[in-house]
Amino acid sequence: MQLDFASREISIKLVYYGPALSGKTTNLVALHGRAGADARGRLMTLETQDDRTLFFDLLPLTFRSKDGDVSLRIKLFTVPGQPIHAATRRLVLQGADGVALIADSRVSETQRNADAFLDLRQNLRDNGIEISKMPLVIQFNKRDLPDIRSDEELARLAARGKEPVFRAVATRGIGVVETFVCLLWLTWRSLDQSHQLARKLSIDGDDLVSTAAQQLGVTTPFRELIAARMGGRAAGAAPGGAP
């Protein structure tokens, strides 16, 4: 997080992580497409030999507090999923405030999902962060494909850990906003607990998350979006393990 008290601007960095071709880029493209032209930065791409890293800013969202306006800038990144890009993933994770792990729902991709989780845990550790301290949301994407892990299996997996789990078909926009809103909500709670932002800036976390959701054209109350999750225990519980 970056906080400028003089300009009253908060910058939050969210990273979409996961195996190659799991739908990380599709999620970001969908979010970028939903944001109004005046509320989003340019969708930037860093090309590598066989993958790409995307990022864009959800431009400063201004909301009022009793002490004056506060601006929130949300920076969203994807990381390349191929094993050879481990160094790039570790670099992009630096300064991350929250992570969405985008998993592939197909049974055939179970091991690659697990490898991505372990890779995330190690890269966070290399950056001096334990995964239990990082706000984390898991999305099982590609629910429209055959040979996927059942809802019952995902429910059992979600019950093992504290991380909220969402089902998604990112190519159709299903589950994309819910994943993002929940990640932003968890990230805000974590940052507020560490830095007392609500008290210092006189802002309400619910208003902050609601404002961000509205910039994506969402009219549903954000807590209803979060309620679509599977699992998700109170903060502080140990992670449940690889998806």
Image: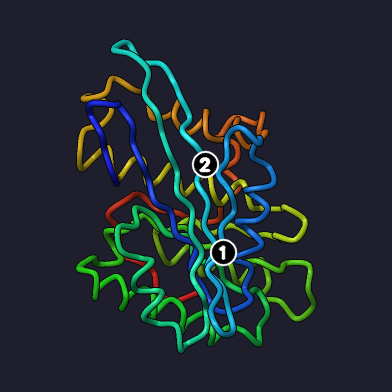
State the residue position of label 1: 45
Res 87 quadrant in image:
bottom left
Visible residue check, residue 95: yes
Visible residue check, residue 158: no
**Is residue 88 depicted above or below 177 in this figure?**
below
10 to the left or right of 78: left
187 to the left or right of 33: left
Give yes or no for contact between labels 1 and 2 (Cβ–Cβ under 8 Å).
Answer: no
**Is residue 243 depicted above or below 5 in this figure?**
below
Percent from the top left, x then y, of residue 110? 57, 83
Percent from the top left, x then y, of residue 31? 63, 48
Res 106 quadrant in image:
bottom right
SS at mark 1 in the image? strand
State the residue position of label 2: 58
What is the spatial separation of the Cα atoms under label 1 and label 2, in whole angstroms?
Answer: 16 Å
SS at mark 2 in the image? strand
